[in-house]
Image: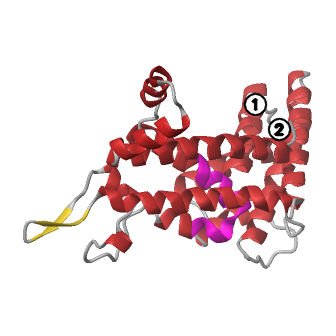
Amino acid sequence: MKNIDKYKSDLKLLIEKGDKLDTSIKYSLYPEEVKKQIKAVIKDDKEVKEYISNILPFGREYQSWYSESLVIIKQLLPDRLTDFTKLFEKPKTRKSIEYGNYVIEDYLQNLTVTSYGNKKVGPDAAVSQFEQQLNILKSVERRFESSLFDIRQLVQADLFDSELEAAKELNKNKFTRGAGAIAGVVLEKHLAQVMINHSLKIAKSHPSISDLNNALKSSEVYDTPTWRKIQYLGDIRNLCDHNKDKEPKKEEVEELISGVGAIIKTVY
């Protein structure tokens, strides 16, 4: 399956799960109203009961939906990423909790704010926040159909996957240096693209993996553990490319290939 098809498939599943979670959060707050709506569509009482018993538990299922949606939005609709995360995360500068700044993280903690014994804001405020998140995710689907959608990076991702598959075959057949060199080139090209994604520039005309990695870390594109991982992968690549005194082990090259595969899927 090509990357663009995989994105479409993953997005469809996430939207379907999002619709189920929308029902779930509303049922947790307004069970009788939701039950009436369900009965209006499903006439059979037994089927209604079965439908309700299969409603996803929002508190348990939301986090995985959020994490997976975050990856899709980060890659395909980066200009809405901040909007998406703000609807979940508590604002660091928040001094008081109002209806407008109550977030899904508050809902998951069942937070209710009272004033002089009266409810000021509570979990019901999270319904509109989740609906906004779901609508942002659904807008990604429309982007696939837009003539403005740039598929260059998805095509590049397909090429990278093909090159890594070729590297696996070479390594399997004991061409460890060649396999490591191919994986290293994929990593280098991907990091260069990440620099472009973040409008970053580097002085060197032919920067190495280490140069790109340091520049991205300095610009806080990713954290120290990711930086260390990429440095380690770069060391294995250098062993394959430059060090003629020591032969790279098959296991090391396997680690390089799988590591690069993980980086190109998680670092944008």
237 displayed left or right of 108: right
- Residue located at (56% from left, 46% from top): 18
- Residue located at (74% from left, 44% from top): 260
Per the picture, the main secondary structure of the magenta-coloured stretch is helix
Q: Where is residue 12 in the image (x, y as percent from the top left)?
A: 71, 43
**Residue marked by disc 2:** 245
Lower position in the chain sequence, tag 2 or tag 1: 2
Q: Where is residue 79 in the image (x, y as percent from the top left)?
A: 66, 71
Looking at the figure, which quarter contains the N terminus?
A: top right
- Residue located at (60% from left, 51% from top): 69
In the rendered view, tell whether residue 219 sits above or below residue 133: below
Q: Which of 142 and 5 is in front in this view?
A: 142
Q: Where does the magenta region start and end?
A: 68-82
Query: What SS does tag 1 mark?
Result: helix
Query: What SS does tag 2 mark?
Result: loop
> Which residue type carries mark 2?
Asp
Q: Position of residue 78 (x, y in %)?
A: 67, 66
Q: Which of marks 2 and 1 is in front?
A: 1
Rate crowding at label 2 as few (under 14), some (14 to 19) or many (20 or more) other CA atoms within 10 Å.
Answer: few
Residues at marks 2 and 1, CA–CA distance in whole angstroms: 20 Å
In the rendered view, tell whether residue 196 sits above or below residue 109: below
Q: Nearer the viewer, residue 247 or 209?
A: 209
Q: Report if residue 88 is visible in the image.
A: no
Rate crowding at label 1 as few (under 14), some (14 to 19) or many (20 or more) other CA atoms within 10 Å.
Answer: some
**Residue marked by disc 1:** 254
